Image (cartoon, grey):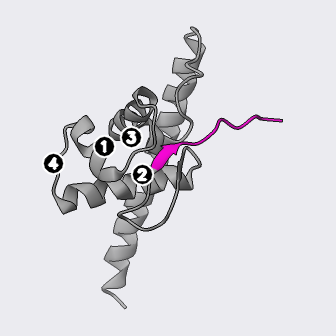
Amino acid sequence: MSGSAPQIASLDEQLTAAETEVAELAITRKTLLSLGGPLDTTAPADPTVANPAYQQILAAFHAGTAPMRAKDICPALGAGATAKDTENLRAKLKRLVARQILTETEPEPEAELFTLAPPTTSA
C-alpha cells in the first residue's frame, strides 16, 4: 500500500493542474468575449466539423452538384487514391453522415454515394 501514496500524490497534482488550466481557459474565454466584436455565428458548433480536413470535404460537396463516392472525392482533396486513403476518407464521410451533415445512399462501399444533407429548420 505504501507504493500507492506517491501515485495518489502525483494524480492529485495532475488533477490540480488540470483544474487550474480549465479555470484559466474559462477566464480567457470570458475575456475574449468581453472584447466585443461580432461572434462568428457561421462557425460550426461541432468541433469535428470545424477541423480543416472536414472543411475541405464540405467545400468539395458545396462545389459539386452530384452525389460523390469516397474514391471520387480523394483527388479533389489532393489525397492519394490508395485503398487506405479511400477508407480514411470514407470514415470521415461516415462521421459527417452520423452528424446529419451528409447523407449516403447505400451502405455498400462500392455503391455508396454521399451528398449534402438537406438543411434542417429549427423550431
Under mark 1, the amino acid is Ile
Q: Position of residue 69 (x, y in %)?
A: 36, 50
Q: Residue at x 59, y 11 (%)?
A: 38
Does the magenta portion include 80? Answer: no
Q: Position of residue 50 (x, y in %)?
A: 44, 36
Alpha-carbon span between mark 3 and mark 4: 16 Å
Q: Residues within 10 Å of mark 4 (few under 14, many from 20)?
A: few
Alpha-carbon span between mark 1 and mark 2: 10 Å
Q: Which residue is mark 2?
A: 93
Q: Which residue is mark 3?
A: 54
| Element type at mark 1 | helix
Alpha-carbon span between mark 3 and mark 2: 9 Å
Q: Is residue 96 above or below residue 83?
A: above
Q: Quadrant location of residue 118?
A: top right
Under mark 2, the amino acid is Leu
Q: Note whether residue 16 is visible.
A: no
